[in-house]
Image (spheres, grey):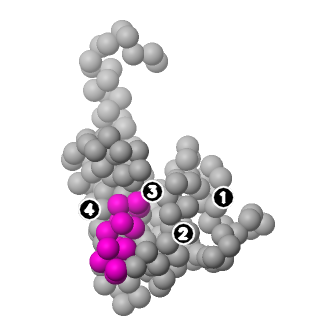
Amino acid sequence: MWLALEEAEKARDKGEVPVGAVMIDSHGDVIARAHNTVETTNDPTNHAEMLCLRKASKSQESWRLLDTTLFVTLEPCPMCVGALLQSRVGRVVWGAPNKQLGADGSWISLLRGSGETKHPYHLSVQVSRNVLEEECSLLLKEFFRRRRAENDNAGSSDVPR
């Protein structure tokens, strides 16, 4: 998770929402690293998880990422969970809860398997929640606190509050 936090810091330094992801194979070797690039690329799908999946699939020469683990600093959104399930990732480890769009119980539950419809090809994903939650949450809170302060200092009366 520390490597994912390093990726999140890279995103923050570029003005992106600080979310980072790292994927390891069954031997514990890093096969992909990524961070959010939504703002710099104007691509709403460029979440850290999605970019990590793309890089891992390329490095493994397969879209099926069985026996891999994804570490991500923020609870994945529905788009990312869908991609994780589709690519058959075996384990997901996330840090801070995503209270607005989290797809592992904070908003909706797509990973828990507690009565919800399961993915037809990938029936079980191991999930570890709230790993280094304090560190992951702090990075996000500081980023948004700074962003709000910058917006307040801009003094734009056109911005609805």
Q: Mark 1 = which residue?
A: 109
The earlier-in-sequence mark between 4 and 3 is: 4
Callout 1 environment at 10 Å: few (<14), some (14 to 19), or many (20+)? some
Work out how far the residue at label 4 is from the one at label 1, CA to CA, in angstroms: 27 Å
Magenta highlight: main SS: helix
Secondary structure at badge 4 equals helix
Whether label 4 touches label 1, CB < 8 Å:
no
Give x and y (percent) for residue 68: 44, 80
Amino acid of disc 2: Gln
Numbered tag placed on residue 86 in the rendering: 2
* Label 3 – label 1 distance at C-alpha: 15 Å
What residue appears at the point 45 percent right and 56 percent down from the top-left corner?
74
Residue type marked 4: Glu
- Residue interval drawn in magenta: 49-61
Residue 7 appears at what percent x and percent y? Answer: 28, 60
Q: Amino acid at mark 1?
A: Ser
